[in-house]
Amino acid sequence: MQVSNILGKRSGLLGKRCLSSLYDQYQKEALSNPTGFWGKHAENLVWDKKWDKVVDTSNPPFTKWFSGGWMNMCYNCVDRHVDSGNGEKSALIWDSPVTNSPIRHMSYNELQDKVSKLARCLVKMGVEPGDRVLIYMPMILEGAVAMLACARIGAIHNVVFGGFASKELSVRIDASKPRVIIAGSNGVMPGKTVQFQPIIDKAMEMSTFKPQYTIYKNRSIETSAVVNGKTVLDFDELLDSVSTGHDCVSLPADHPLYLLYTSGTTGTPKAVQRNAADYATVLLYTMKNEFDLNPDEVWFSATDYGWVVGHSYCVYAPLLSRNPSIIFEGKPVGTPDASTIHRILSEHDVRSAFASPSIMRILCREEPEGTAGDAYPRPNFGTMFLAGERCDIGTLLWVRDTLKLNPVDHYWQTESGTPILMPPVALGEKVDCNGSAGKSSVGNNILIVDDQGNVLPDGEFGQIVAKLPLRPGFFPTLFQNDSAYAEKYFTDFPGYYNTFDAGYRDSEGNVFVMARTDDIINVGAVRLSTGAVEEAIAHHELISECAVVGQDDPLMGERPLGFVVMTPGSELTSEITKEVIKLVRDHIGPHTGLQELLQVERLPKTISQKILRNMMVAIVNNKPYKVSPTIDDPTVVGEIVECVESWREGLSN
Ligand code: AMP
């Protein structure tokens, strides 16, 4: 791993160690006695049959939790609260400034009714435990209903972000082979409506596998029809067609709850699998002990169902711990302005919230003086948790000092399902807004290692890894691909999970996450594979080769920048750039943020013809770099530097 060579040692970060805090006690117990610690927390759920063994580590890198136990996630999220007399309480609160709709509260009673009826309909369509259901929804309550209906009957849901275009959707259809698709008829953006049906129809044309049914939550279109030989049904009519719901199906602890496809390093998405029981245990634990919430306090996670935070902290965790969860269909600005987030916090008396640093940067750019919130008092607000990308200290301090929202940066991944690093604020420790994402969350043992897997001393820069066993909720495997799981994440550093992030740790155990070490970049807290963007660009007939790298961006964190080699005789024009940007939008979606291409004669490569992307990233971002000794032709470096410098000059003129 070259990062350590480039950036060298960090020092002077050592602070005072606070001994024997509540965090230290919990962490010691969770690491030395995971059976006792997680067994105790699992008791807070309702089990149909108690487990035989809390944790089984006999087949590394695979960890099995709660073997022999049986339960149902949906029961624990919904029916449990109805059965305990809380059925009238708000489970979900829909706040949709983009559609100007009235705010809608959905109680546990209503949620149970809708979820169980949809579950009944799915069973009638032949959906069985283990079958996949693909969900392609905007941020409407039916998205959560669909997820929970799957969980109720043991169908494995695969939510696909509504911003993905047909090609990415078709890839996920072929990969997960869903029996049914549940979709919204359209998504609403400020000033425009995106029809989902044509996107789905096109995806179905492209895919080899054809799901049998598509159910639309009708916001505008004709349904109850047959399109391309497949049955298209209306969500509401379907629910009205059944008089009784379906009960929760008891499932083994390791039954998969959902799949979530993340960008893979080759451009092919891989399916992170999540099992229900250990996930439920850790989610419930985190709401009190990491996000500091008591039941009935309102929680707001400003994200989308399509991402992991949408699964964990819009739906499952708040429902498990009975925190009304705000489902937000809107944007930080433009729906109608920068006051929206403040209005939500005030109007719903939100106790704590979750957002990405990009949202905060957008608010800061729009309204740096931060007065948009003045009209919205929030006497009970606790903490603004930020994650998804590195939060620069300037933004953290702005959120703290101008918005007065007590920001807490923490770090996690789709793979982990819950925080990996977190300042233990809920266990009584203070937060420094110093750029660290916190300590190992309880039950995770995060270390910094060198290229050979040796644990590095505090302050030294290296690869961030997690020692096995990983805490509950971490993905137990990649769906139907144990070998790729073991190979991708556990071979570089045997005994450790490779996060593919690099950073360093201070003497108190705070970890600073600094750089990604594979081809993933983070655009507005959304993980994007530069390989996937390259694949899309390569479809242009006049481009013979390309390399996409992450360019630091003050607003989005990073943005993709494309270097292209044109076919002989052709030149890059603004027209071609537009065509390429459209290609990328059509293949992946509008959220990639690709805006620019730079034409070069050649790409820098090793003797074995691997593109030296790390060096290009450093050149683009004006950082120090070393020319690899295995470079094929060192003179290419000068060409790249020259190209980047004249581009930069163009930008500043
Ligand atoms: P995703 O799986 O899409 O949530 O992306 C996970 C990646 O986002 C991580 O591997 C990091 O590269 C990045 N990330 C998430 N949270 C943080 C954070 N607090 N600081 C730095 N990077 C972060």
Image: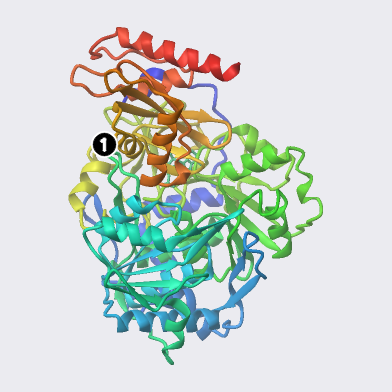
In the displayed structure image, the side of residue 429 where residue 480 appears, left or right: left
Q: Which of 630 and 335 lies nearest the eye of the viewer?
A: 335
Coloring scheme used: rainbow
User: Residue 382 location, x and y as percent?
Assistant: 67, 55
Residue 30 falls in image quadrant: bottom left
Label 1: few (<14), some or many (≥20) within 10 Å?
A: some
Where 132 falls versus 63 (above or below)? below
Is residue 354 toward the left or the right of residue 406 in the image? Answer: left
Give the amino acid at mark 1. Phe
Identity of the residue furthest to the bottom in this view: 243
Q: Which residue is mark 1?
A: 493
Q: Residue at coordinates 52% horizontally, 50% vertically from top-left?
A: 23
Q: Is residue 41 visible?
A: yes
Residue 535 horizontal/vertical position (percent): 30, 37
Give me the residue at 27% from left, 43% from top: 489
Q: Does residue 9 appear anywhere in the picture?
A: no
Question: In the rendered image of this protein, does residue 531 appear above or below residue 610?
Answer: below
